[in-house]
Image (cartoon, grey):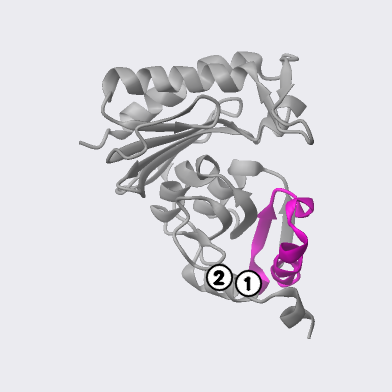
Amino acid sequence: MQPELAFLHRLADAAAEETLPRFRANTTVSNKLQGGFDPVTEADRAAEAAIRDLIGQHYPDHGIMGEEHGSEGLDRDYLWVIDPIDGTRAFISGLPVWGTLIGLYHRGRAVAGLMDQPFTGERFVADQSGTYYRGPDGERTIRSRDCGSLAQATLFTTSPHLFAETEIGRYRAVENGVNLFRYGCDCYAYTLVAAGHADLVIENNLQAYDIAALIAILESAGAVVTDWEGGRPEQGGNIIAAGSAAVHAEALALLALGPTEQSS
């Protein structure tokens, strides 16, 4: 059977016990790349270990895909997909827009997910019954909004510097058409779309663990999330999330055009 949302809350609590004491505490940072910068901290590794330990105790027949400690049982019906700290660069910079992401797939399809930001005390959790928020301002069910058109939309991306040469023109075509764009926020941006505070997130080159938890949060709140071709997002890649089907379609049409078509 699919775990109840209460179990996802337990997983988030266990992760927060490892991440929160290390936030803004001058934690040691390691680099996973020789030719670039892909930071990882003790908090990443400890939080994922805590999550995996609880899953192993209660659901030993489930598979696990984790960013820091590898994968096991990828062919099982239920698969947990874990990013213990999405936004490690924000974490090591003291910026509270990182989050713990815990997603659950059933036969390859996202069915539940959680994003926890323990420093601000905000948690977003979803299954197929809805998307729920808990934070300093109370608890409630959340829904995405329909802002009406791309011209009225608020757009987030982590950074335009992350797009490849073949992608930046496509992204800029959307950015040039929105009402407001903002950079940064990592996974927090997607929860703002789910909660109806923003309208679009466009990012590239995501891994499955970057998006897995957010799919159910978005879809159960009424939002739309796909890759840039309109396909399912469970495997990551280039991702677009929108608060409504109409705004998603309008932005997707621009992303589908190559730089040559856009400039002609």
Residue furthest out toward the left = 1
Q: 58 or 167: nearer the eye?
A: 167
Residue drawn at x 71%, y 15% as measured from the top left: 27
Residue 106 lies, in percent from the top left, at 30, 44
Residue drawn at x 69%, y 75% as measured from the top left: 258
Q: Which residue is mark 1?
A: 150
Q: Is residue 161 magenta?
A: yes
Residue 181 lies, in percent from the top left, at 73, 59
Crowding around mark 2 (Cα neighbors within 10 Å: few <14, some 14 to 19, many 20+) is many
Q: Which residue is mark 2?
A: 247
Residue drawn at x 57%, y 54% as measured from the top left: 237
Marks 2 and 1 sit apart, C-alpha to C-alpha, by 6 Å
- The tag on residue 104 is none
Whether residue 78 sits left or right of residue 151 in the image: it is left
Whether residue 151 sits left or right of residue 83 in the image: it is right
Residue furthest out toward the bottom = 264
Residue 24 lies, in percent from the top left, at 72, 19
Is disc 2 placed on a helix, strand or loop?
Answer: helix
Q: Is residue 7 magenta?
A: no
Mark 2 in CB contact with mark 1 (< 8 angstroms) = yes
Which residues are the magenta region? 151-177
Of pointers 2 and 1, the one earlier in the residue sequence? 1
Compared with 143, 121 (above or below) is: above
For the C terminus, the quadrant is bottom right
Crowding around mark 1 (Cα neighbors within 10 Å: few <14, some 14 to 19, many 20+) is many
For the N terminus, the quadrant is top left
Residue 207 lies, in percent from the top left, at 56, 44
